């Protein structure tokens, strides 16, 4: 007689690895021994520090959150959706759970007995590798929602995010607790408790590591009575220790911990046991490393119910940014990943703000981000630049329609401010009636800026023409883009006027090659890296991209990349402009993280000689791109 329940489970499992790697009969045998768990929201599958179950789990329906308990607070590490595995410790190291798992919503989970599945791990290398990788990274199985080459929900590639995470070098504890072999166990237990650490490294007189004692050793060997508290450290320590160098990657650390069935690695000066101890890396540190990656943050954003949760995630993103900079991950990768998370934050903010409204919108609308965020170059939390475009309505309905979207915009900008995006001092935000209009009004505005330019309209064009849709209808945004390129094609004079603005930016260096600083005001005696250096490169890329009708390319680095392809005679110049912009962007970001501000105004006396030279090398491409604009648009005749 057929077991229809087992067949249904089989049909589900065969969609996902590692089960898709098994034969039909093998899968049916496993399915027949699976328990089905029905979980109410808030119900635990297992709790932190609980003894490992004899099963691991896969989500059938719903969502299971994985949490670390920190005091009385639960810190979300990951969320498992349909097809995701969790609770794999029983298959790998059989230690107590380091995280809790509970249902974030009503869920169905399949519990798979470890004894039933273990033979397939032993016999199938692909299954073995998949489970090891899933356990080590605590990453979701990307086959759940994607096919090869596709991106998840138009946000971020899980492959890319996980690859970047695992290729980073580890962040280890640089001041580990140490003791000598003449220490009594009771003393080190008290010190571990006082320092709130889970391990002590035993070193010799040269500070070379010779052994390690963890909290689990104290429980297993002392608390059980096998050894007295007065025993000497060498009696219970684990030796020899596993040592690695400071450049150990997260991926390598995962493998080392799992392969050796240990919870701690000793980091030494040259990676050997015959060298000084410089730190300790634990399985907890590994969890922290994976808990703070873009894919996890985006999943957290999508499930957030309150703005305050988004603020917490944005702070995590700042820490991730700092790590990326320290690891010298390519700038374009950093921009893409941080921008995806920022966009997800804005989208979720809009969704939560719409729920605050008394009624849904009656017409289509688009929410645009402008300036640095529109160019996908906003690494630090600078001020907001955004706008709303709504569908055309009758004259009679215009005022009430605009009033609705202004109210929505006020809610959005207020919530973005709560997250950490400052209000724009010039009020270039959707909550300003000037920047919340129908598509026809926006088209008229854009045409006016291009046909009868003024100093203000030239400035506004440089901000608003770097727009990007983050929420809503794309059709209206495409209409606005067509208006811009149509106006440019009809008259190159407008590009010339934009070029004049680029040439009028204040110079970074004086006649004697000294940095030119602000002469008065709040930022007196500081160097304005944005206005004096970065903006000329941004303006040059924008103007030449408009000249070549490069639609859909807003990012400055990508614009120079495309320009190098289109103008082979200027390829070297455009590549040097891109290199200079990368250096300036990273420099400003590091300054901002260091001083907890926008990084725009730099105190030169805080820079080293090498940093000043690095900055000065970026200034030649600035002069060169200005010369290209001057010659191409005959700007001497326009000024």
Image (cartoon, rainbow, N blue to C red):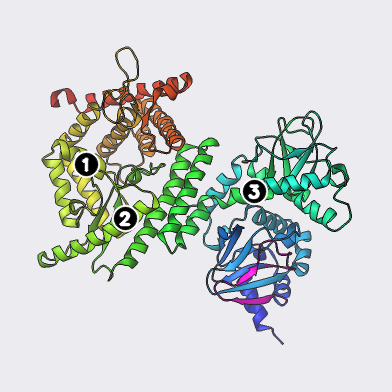
| Residue at 84% in and 54% down | 222
Q: Reply yes or no: does residue 631 show up in magenta.
A: no
Residue carrying label 2: 414
Residue neighbourhood size for the residue with mark 2, other residues' Cα within 10 Å, grouped as few (<14), some (14–19), many (≥20): some
| Residue at 72% in and 87% down | 1
Residue neighbourhood size for the residue with mark 3, other residues' Cα within 10 Å, grouped as few (<14), some (14–19), many (≥20): many
Task: Give how far across and how far down residue 195 sits, in percent.
Answer: 68, 45
Vertical comparison of 227 with 408: above or below:
above
Quadrant location of the C terminus?
Answer: top left
Task: Give how far across and how far down residue 307 sits, in percent.
Answer: 40, 59
> Upstream in the sequence, badge 2 or badge 3?
3
Circle nearer the viewer, 1 or 2: 2
Residue 606, by quadrant, is top left
Can the viewer see residue 149 in this picture? no
**Residue range corresponding to the magenta coloring:** 33-56
Q: Residue furthest top?
A: 512
Residue 23, by quadrant, is bottom right
Between residue 493 and residue 134, name the one nearer to us: 134
Vertical comparison of 546 with 367: above or below:
above
Residue carrying label 1: 461
Position of 340 with respect to 395 (left or right) is right
Circle nearer the viewer, 2 or 3: 2
């Amino acid at each position: 007689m057929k077991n229809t329940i087992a067949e249904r489970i089989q049909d589900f499992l065969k969609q996902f690895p590692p089960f898709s790697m098994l034969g039909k009969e093998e899968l049916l045998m496993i399915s027949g021994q699976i328990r089905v768990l029905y979980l109410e929201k808030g119900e635990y599958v297992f709790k932190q520090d609980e003894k490992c179950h004899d099963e691991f789990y896969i989500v059938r329906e719903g969502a299971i959150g994985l949490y670390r308990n920190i005091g009385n607070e639960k810190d979300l590490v990951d969320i498992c959706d349909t097809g995701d595995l969790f609770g794999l410790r029983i298959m790998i190291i059989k230690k107590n759970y380091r995280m809790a798992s509970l249902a974030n919503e009503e869920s169905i989970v399949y519990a798979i007995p470890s004894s039933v599945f273990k033979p397939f791990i032993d016999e199938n290398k692909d299954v073995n590798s998949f489970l090891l990788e899933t356990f080590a990274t605590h990453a979701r199985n990307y086959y759940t929602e994607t096919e090869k080459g596709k991106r998840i929900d138009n946000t971020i590639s899980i492959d890319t995010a996980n690859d970047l995470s695992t290729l980073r070098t580890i962040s280890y504890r640089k001041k580990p607790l140490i003791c000598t072999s003449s220490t009594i166990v009771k003393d080190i237990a008290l010190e571990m408790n006082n320092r709130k650490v889970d391990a002590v490294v035993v070193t010799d007189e040269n500070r070379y590591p010779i052994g390690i004692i963890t909290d689990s050793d104290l429980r297993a060997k002392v608390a059980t009575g096998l050894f007295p508290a007065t025993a000497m450290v060498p009696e219970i320590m684990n030796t020899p220790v596993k040592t690695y160098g400071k450049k150990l990657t997260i991926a390598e650390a995962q493998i080392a911990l799992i392969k050796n069935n240990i919870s701690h690695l000793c980091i030494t000066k040259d990676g050997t046991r015959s060298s000084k101890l410089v730190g300790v890396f634990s399985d907890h540190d590994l969890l922290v490393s994976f808990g703070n990656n873009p894919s996890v943050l985006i999943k957290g954003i999508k499930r957030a119910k309150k703005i305050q949760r988004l603020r917490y995630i944005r702070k995590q993103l700042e820490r991730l940014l700092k790590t990326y900079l320290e690891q010298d991950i390519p700038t374009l990768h950093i921009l893409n990943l941080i921008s995806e998370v920022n966009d997800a934050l804005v989208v979720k903010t809009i969704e939560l703000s719409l729920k605050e409204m008394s009624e849904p919108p009656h017409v289509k609308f688009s929410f645009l981000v402008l300036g640095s965020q529109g160019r996908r170059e906003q690494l630090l939390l600078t001020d907001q630049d955004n706008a709303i475009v709504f569908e055309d309505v009758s004259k009679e309905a215009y005022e009430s329609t605009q009033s609705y979207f202004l109210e929505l915009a006020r809610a959005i900008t207020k919530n973005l401010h709560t997250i950490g995006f400052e209000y724009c001092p010039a009020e270039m935000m959707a909550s300003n009636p000037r920047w919340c209009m129908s598509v026809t009004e926006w088209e008229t505005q854009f045409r006016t800026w291009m046909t009868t330019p003024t100093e203000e309209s030239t400035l506004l064009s440089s901000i608003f023409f770097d727009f990007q849709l983050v929420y809503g209808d794309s059709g209206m945004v495409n209409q606005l883009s067509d208006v811009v390129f149509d106006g440019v094609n009809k008259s190159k004079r407008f590009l010339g006027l934009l070029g004049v603005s680029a040439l009028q930016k204040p110079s970074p260096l004086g006649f004697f090659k000294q940095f030119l600083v602000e002469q008065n005001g709040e930022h007196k005696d500081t160097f304005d890296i944005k206005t004096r250096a970065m903006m000329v490169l941004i303006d040059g890329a924008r103007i030449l991209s408009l000249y070549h009708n490069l639609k859909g390319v807003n990012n400055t680095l990508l614009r120079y990349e495309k320009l190098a392809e289109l103008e082979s005679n200027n390829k070297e110049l455009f590549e040097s402009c891109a290199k200079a912009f990368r250096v300036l962007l990273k420099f400003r970001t590091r300054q901002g993280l260091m001083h907890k501000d926008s990084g725009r105004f730099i105190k030169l006396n805080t820079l080293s000689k090498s940093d000043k030279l690095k900055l000065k090398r970026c200034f030649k491409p600035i002069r060169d791109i200005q010369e290209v604009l001057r010659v191409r648009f005959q700007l001497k005749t326009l000024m």
